[in-house]
Amino acid sequence: MQYNKGVITKQYVDTMLEQYPTMSPYILLRMNIAIPHASPEDGVRSIGMSLLKINNGLDVGGNQKIHLVVVIAAVDKNQHFQALMQLMKLASTSADIKKMIQMDALDQLYELIQTYSK
């Protein structure tokens, strides 16, 4: 989610970077997906999510690597909760996480993610 698209402000990005200068267990869902975020008042203009797929993974300790980072932007706590529940459902499905890590086509990745928003 680029702040120049208007969903979030630069302040939102700066706040996330201040809160999470390193990978923290507080932003990991089942050791599969990192979800750095800040509060709506830190610069959310409209609801949105952004996915970063890291092909080689990011070391988070031990032999664990994170390949998926999702930034959540919600204008209130209710929207934030709904998005988080969908991500938790996705994170609990190891087979789909593995598929996502291996996918190169954005449309396939998007299609798989959409099955969790229903």
Image (cartoon, grey):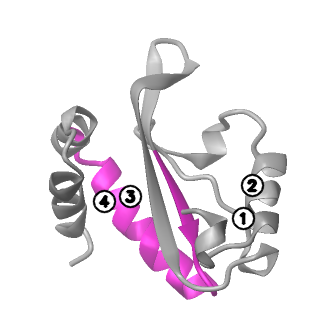
Q: Which is in the foreground here, disc 4 or disc 2?
A: 2
The CA distance from mark 1 to mark 3 is 18 Å
The CA distance from mark 2 to mark 3 is 20 Å
The CA distance from mark 4 to mark 2 is 23 Å
| Among numbered discs 1 and 3, the one appearing first in the sequence | 1
Residues at circles 2 and 3 in contact by the CB criterion of under 8 Å: no
Q: Describe the element under mark 3 as helix, strand or loop.
A: helix
Label 2 sits on residue: 16
- In the picture, the disc for residue 88 is 3
Residue 15, by quadrant, is bottom right
Q: How many marks?
A: 4
Residues at circles 3 and 4 in contact by the CB criterion of under 8 Å: yes
Q: Describe the element under mark 2 as helix, strand or loop.
A: helix
Q: Residues within 10 Å of mark 3 (few under 14, many from 20)?
A: some
Label 4 sits on residue: 89
Q: In the shown orientation, is residue 48 left or right of residue 39?
A: left
Q: Residues within 10 Å of mark 4 (few under 14, many from 20)?
A: few
Q: Residue at x 23, y 47 (%)?
A: 93
| Kind of residue indicated by mark 2 | Met
- Which quarter shows the N terminus? bottom right
| Among numbered discs 4 and 2, the one appearing first in the sequence | 2
The CA distance from mark 1 to mark 4 is 21 Å
- Is-magenta flag for residue 84? yes
Residue 27: % across, % down: 60, 48
- In the picture, the disc for residue 38 is 1
Residues at circles 1 and 3 in contact by the CB criterion of under 8 Å: no
- Which quarter shows the C terminus? bottom left
Q: Describe the element under mark 1 as helix, strand or loop.
A: loop
| Among numbered discs 1 and 4, the one appearing first in the sequence | 1
